[in-house]
Amino acid sequence: MEKKTEKRISEILKLLDEAYGAETEPTLTYSPRKPHELLIATILSAQCTDERVNQVTLTLFQKYPDIPSFSEANIKELERDIHPCGFYHTKALHIRDCCKMLLQEFAGEVPSRLEDLIRLPGVGRKTANVVRTHVFHEPSIVVDTHVKRISKRLGLTEQTDPVKIEFDLMDKLPKDHWSRINLQLITLGRSICKSQKPKCSECFLNKICDFGPSSR
């Protein structure tokens, strides 16, 4: 990587740290003693806000307190329970079948290896990396819609495929920033760098962003 590019990336990371800190706590609510809750909450978060997921899981995790109870859930009832999160037919099946596999193949424990996690129904690299980051404290890049959009706008990647973006960012960013940049870019995407109407004039990255007016 060129020195100029390294310097620019260092400046981006410095400004993100100054604005949002280095915290890596997830915005999804779960019990640290029950890692399957984060797994399920992340499955529910597809095409749904974390705020709504947290509202649903508040009662969901009381009704289904462990992996066996989810694995034995009546599908129609589970669909009703998670209905506000959208795509409830598919998500209900994924959650039940995921918990069945956890019992059958992983002794009722959430695995830490990426290769094992992505074998679970409803679990792709994004969900797997959320679990690895927060449950197992393994530095991981989580490419959601905000990370995909903003990393492109900042010139951190030219890729459009989430997996290629993940590897691109892993190659370019220091490992100690992998986990924190997930939440930093998500926060930036929700508040300033929005998809349709980005608030470029308010953005602290405006002067070094490839997308902002100052770069045109």
Image (spheres, rainbow, N blue to C red):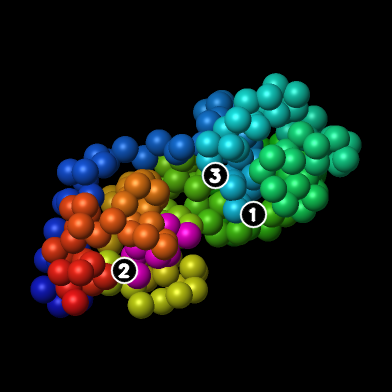
What secondary structure characterizes most of the magenta part? helix
Residue at 28 percent of width and 56 percent of height = 199
Q: Along the horizontal axis of the image, is 68 left or right of 144? A: right
Task: Find the magenta span and give its range.
Answer: 145-152
How would you rate the neighbour count of disc 2 (Cα within 10 Å): few for under 14, some for 14-19, many for 20 or more? some
Which is more N-terminal, label 3 or label 2?
Answer: 3
Residue 49 circle label: 3
The three-letter amino acid code for the residue at tag 1 is Val
Residue at 50 percent of width and 48 percent of height = 130
Q: Along the horizontal axis of the image, is 4 left or right of 70? A: left
| SS at badge 1 | loop
Which is more N-terminal, label 1 or label 3?
Answer: 3
Quarter of the picture containing the N terminus is: bottom left
Q: As rendered, which of 138 and 5 lies closer to the eye?
A: 5
Residue at 68 percent of width and 58 percent of height = 119
Residue where numbered disc 2 is placed? 153
- Answer whether residue 56 is magenta in the image: no
Instruction: Report if the CB atoms under discs 2 and 3 are less than 8 Å apart.
Output: no
Q: Position of residue 75 (x, y in %)?
A: 86, 41
The three-letter amino acid code for the residue at tag 3 is Thr
Instruction: Report if the CB atoms under discs 3 and 1 are less than 8 Å apart.
Output: no
Compared to residue 139, the image places residue 83 above or below, namely: above
Q: Along the horizontal axis of the image, is 38 left or right of 136? A: right
Distance, label 1 to label 2, CA atoms, is 27 Å
Q: As rendered, which of 194 and 70 lies closer to the eye?
A: 194
Where is residue 39, by image quadrant? Answer: top right
Q: Is residue 54 visible?
A: yes
Q: Is residue 94 visible?
A: no
Compared to residue 157, the image places residue 71 above or below, namely: above
Where is residue 160, by image quadrant? Answer: bottom left
Distance, label 2 to label 3, CA atoms, is 22 Å
Residue where numbered disc 1 is placed? 123
